[in-house]
Image (cartoon, rainbow, N blue to C red):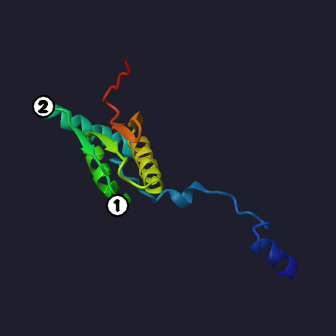
Amino acid sequence: MGAVRKVANYLGLGVVEPYSDDEYDDVEYEDDWMPASERAARRWQQAQDESEPARIVMVRPRKYDDALTVGQHFREGCAVVMDVAGMATAEATRMVDFAAGLAYGCDGRIERIADKIFLLAPAEIEVSVI
């Protein structure tokens, strides 16, 4: 093989082998796979089916490490009111970004309800503004 052909193959510019499904026939996929949002919705629905009253948790994080507490309560199906007034501005921004990602990833939503106070609501909780 010539030097030019070797370089072309190395760069991926050489002959491309045709795709074959036969290579992937042995791969088995789990039947119980589902998106994280669907798993979260089932968990929240189970919590409601157990005739347990809906909970709202108030969290006043002091540092970014308290994000775990916010995430734990939200993933358990609780609405979380998060007051970041006691945090430095940079950490409060990170905390709100984390909470927004958490809400988006679990099909919930985040809403600002006052200055530096946010509501993280699971998908099945309806929030009305009057």
Label 2 amino acid? Ser
Q: Which of the image's four quarters has the C terminus?
A: top left
Vertical placement of residue 59 versus 25, above or below: above
Residue 65, label in figure: 1
Within the image, what quadrant is residue 66 found in? bottom left
- Give the residue at x 31% y 49%: 70
In the image, 34 versus 80, the foreground residue is 80
Q: At which x and y percent is residue 9?
A: 77, 72
Q: Give the vertical position of 27 relative to 110 (above or below).
A: below
Residue 2 shows in the view: no
Say the numbered circle drawn on residue 51. Answer: 2
Q: Who is closer to the viewer here, 103 or 113?
A: 113
Q: Residue at x 33, y 56 (%)?
A: 62
Query: In front: mark 1 or mark 2?
Result: 1
Residue 38 in which image quadrant: top left
Q: Is residue 4 visible?
A: yes
Q: How far across and how far down the image is residue 36, in percent?
A: 37, 46
Q: Nearer the viewer, residue 2 or 84?
A: 84
Q: Pick out the residue farthest to the top.
A: 130
Q: Judging from the image, what secondary structure is the residue with disc 1 in?
A: helix
Which residue is at 25% across, 40% downward? 78
Amino acid type shown at disc 1: Asp
